[in-house]
Image (tube, helix red, strand yellow):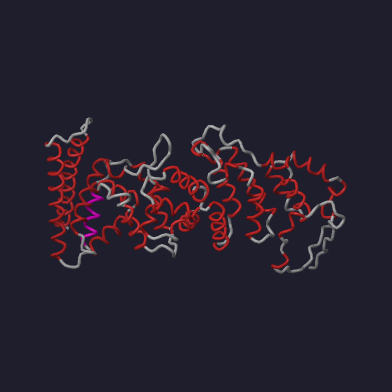
């Protein structure tokens, strides 16, 4: 049955626009006072002077202005011109980044939510521009916010400027394809000279440029990495940061961005993994980054790439204590832990692997993890060896490694090399218990196998 067509609304012409019909870069420099402007697209606002229209905008929230910008091309242009005025930029570009007590969840901060809404406003107002023109215009508007710049803030640790910038960019680029996001990263690198700064820190002695290391960490975390909802997006941006560099430099950058920092000044602590056993909090950032690259299934990272990166990381800046290496593997998850250990088995590094098993058991004992996990991991690794002789030699190496590590700790204590808080003695205590519980689980496993 035919129905009557309602013609009371505005009909949209059935015309397909070519890409070349996008707004030209001079779009934002046009004056709105000219008679050529299609004022009819302003609706009831056409009767108002431009000054009155801008006064009305002052009473609207950023979200409301964002919605209004989608009404028509002319309204959007009016809003862009409002943003460019001193009163508009002063109202929209809030810069109260230092007078806030940092909340437990930064996204709950009002100023962060403001910049999320502002990102959406700019996304809609610049919708028809090519990517590079959008970025140039947005940079021109945001350039007056000093805390958005790489070296713009004197107290970056206490500043919310870079997190706000990151929220803004995340909202602006959400839904963009990989090629456009790659252009954004290249634009930011040109703007901040980020690649040259990274080259400086990866080619220098660790800790020789502490302030620059801190700036790079804050910029990468707060602007590029921390605000994404989907892990695949975070993996994309982390890949952009790491992939241009050789593996050894990738490991150094990973440590700078995700490694442990001083609670006093936020600077990277390079000796943390070398001087003594560390805690989970010092390794969690690194483990999460490794899992991000391994689990998201991006084509740019194979399993061998990630394992090589972990191997390289364990000698930054020098070879880590094996206990810290074992803790990182546990935090990185079963798949990465097994793949790392299997790689050692395949490459004939059974002695190193046996010693690693000892420290996996030690971490399980200290952290009250299930010891049967370490035993089952060893059992799984045993299947990688191609012959029974290799397997038996490996198991003998595990038993010898337990004895060797215990004797080393005992000799250190007997020689008088003890800490004031007896950490060495406590470590030996945990290791003896780890050996007992590890072999108990081996006995359980063997007896259960015999009974079946």
Residue 95 lies left or right of residue 14; in this view the side is: left
Q: Main secondary structure of the magenta part?
A: helix
Q: Quadrant of residue 59?
A: top right
Can you give x and y, in whole percent of width and height, for residue 427 in the image? Answer: 20, 39
Residue 25 percent location from the top left of the image:
71, 59
Q: Give the side of residue 421 with respect to residue 59, left or right.
A: left
Above or below 282: residue 293: below
Q: Residue at x 81, y 65 (%)?
A: 3
Tell me the quarter of the image containing the N terminus. bottom right
- What residue do we see at 23% from left, 59% from top? 381
Image quadrant in which the C terminus is located: bottom left
Which of the two residues, 433 or 159, is positioned nearer the viewer here? 159
The part of the chain drawn in magenta is 372-382
40 or 273: which is nearer to us?
273
Of the pair 232 and 315, the residue shown nearer to us: 315
In the rendered image, residue 379 lying in the magenta stretch gets the answer yes
Left or right of residue 366: residue 58: right
Please indicate whether residue 187 sits to the left or right of residue 271 in the image: right
């Amino acid at each position: 049955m035919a129905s009557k067509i309602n013609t009371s609304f505005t009909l949209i012409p059935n015309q397909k626009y070519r890409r070349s019909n996008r707004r030209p870069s001079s779009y934002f420099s046009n004056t709105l006072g000219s008679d050529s402007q299609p004022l009819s697209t302003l609706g009831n606002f056409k009767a108002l002077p431009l000054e009155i229209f801008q006064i009305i905008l002052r009473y609207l929230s950023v979200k409301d202005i964002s919605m209004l910008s989608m009404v028509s091309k002319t309204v959007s242009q009016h809003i862009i011109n409002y943003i460019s005025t001193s009163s508009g930029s002063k109202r929209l570009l809030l810069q109260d980044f230092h007078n806030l007590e940092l909340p437990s969840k930064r996204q709950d901060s009002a100023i962060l939510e403001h910049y999320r809404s502002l990102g959406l406003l700019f996304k809609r107002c610049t919708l028809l521009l090519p990517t590079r023109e959008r970025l140039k215009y947005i940079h021109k508007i945001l350039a007056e916010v000093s805390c958005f710049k790489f070296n713009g803030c004197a107290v970056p640790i206490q500043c919310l400027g870079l997190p706000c910038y990151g929220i803004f960019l995340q909202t602006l680029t959400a839904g963009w394809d990989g090629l456009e996001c790659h252009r954004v990263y290249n634009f930011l690198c040109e703007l901040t000279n980020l690649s040259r700064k990274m080259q400086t820190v990866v080619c220098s002695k660790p800790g020789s440029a502490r302030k620059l290391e801190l700036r790079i960490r804050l910029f990468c975390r707060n602007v590029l990495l921390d605000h994404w909802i989907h892990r695949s997006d975070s993996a994309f941006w982390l890949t952009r940061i790491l992939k241009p560099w050789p593996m050894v430099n990738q490991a150094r950058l990973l440590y700078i961005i995700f490694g442990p920092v001083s609670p006093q000044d936020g600077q990277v602590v390079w000796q943390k993994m070398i001087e003594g056993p560390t805690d989970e909090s010092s390794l969690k950032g690194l483990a999460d980054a490794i899992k991000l690259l391994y689990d998201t299934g991006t084509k740019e990272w194979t399993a061998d790439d990630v394992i090589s990166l972990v191997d390289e990381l364990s000698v930054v800046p020098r070879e880590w204590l094996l206990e810290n290496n074992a803790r990182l593997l546990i935090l990185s998850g079963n798949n990465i832990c097994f793949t790392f250990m299997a790689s050692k088995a395949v490459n004939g590094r059974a002695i190193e692997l046996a010693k690693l098993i000892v420290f996996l058991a030690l971490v399980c004992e200290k952290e009250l993890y299930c010891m049967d996990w370490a035993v089952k991991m060893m059992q799984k690794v045993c299947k990688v060896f191609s012959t029974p002789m290799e397997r038996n030699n490996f198991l003998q190496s595990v038993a010898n490694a337990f004895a060797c590590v215990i004797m080393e700790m005992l000799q250190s204590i007997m020689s008088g090399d003890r800490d004031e808080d007896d950490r060495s003695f406590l470590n030996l205590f945990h290791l003896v218990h780890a050996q007992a519980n590890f072999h108990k689980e081996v006995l359980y496993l063997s007896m259960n196998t015999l009974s079946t």
